[in-house]
């Protein structure tokens, strides 16, 4: 189990990829949330730290959900960090 995220390499090993479904895009626009597929067995705190250090963003909350064998992290960003901006940097929007 990974305990702390200190480098971009660790961030990339924890966060596999962002999800870009219609529902995920709608949440980006209305709730300032993004959905990421993450590595199994990683805690909310580690995911939060990986996103904050990897994307230089302030995270308000992380909710986890396992669906179809994939672990999804629903990440709500602070108002000063729009999820749309992060999605644009990642090439989703």
Image: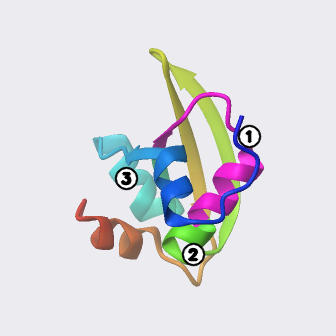
Label 2 to label 1, Cα distance in Å?
A: 18 Å
Above or below, comparing residue 2 to residue 55 in the picture: above
Frontmost of labels 2 and 3 is 2
Bounds of the magenta segment: 36-51
- Locate residue 44: give its quadrant: top right
Q: Secondary structure at mark 3?
A: helix
Tag 2–tag 3 contact (CB < 8 Å): no
Tag 3–tag 1 contact (CB < 8 Å): no
- Residue 33 x/y as whole percent: 52, 57
Q: Which residue is mark 3?
A: 26
Q: Residue at x 38, y 76 (%)?
A: 85
Q: Secondary structure at mark 1?
A: loop
Between 5 and 62, the one nearer to me in the picture: 5
Direction bottom: furthest residue: 80
Q: Which residue is mark 2?
A: 57
Q: Secondary structure at mark 2?
A: loop
Count of marks, rendered view: 3
Q: Which residue is mark 1?
A: 43
The N terminus sits in image quarter: top right
**First in sequence: mark 3 vs mark 1:** 3
């Amino acid at each position: 189990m990974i305990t702390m995220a200190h480098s971009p390499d660790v961030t990339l090993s924890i966060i596999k990829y962002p999800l870009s479904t219609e529902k995920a895009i709608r949440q980006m626009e209305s709730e300032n949330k993004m959905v990421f597929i993450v590595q199994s067995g990683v805690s909310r705190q580690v995911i939060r730290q990986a996103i904050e250090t990897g994307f230089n963003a302030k995270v308000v909350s992380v909710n986890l959900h396992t669906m179809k064998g994939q672990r999804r992290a629903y990440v709500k960003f602070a108002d000063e960090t729009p999820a749309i901006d992060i999605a644009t940097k990642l090439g989703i929007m």
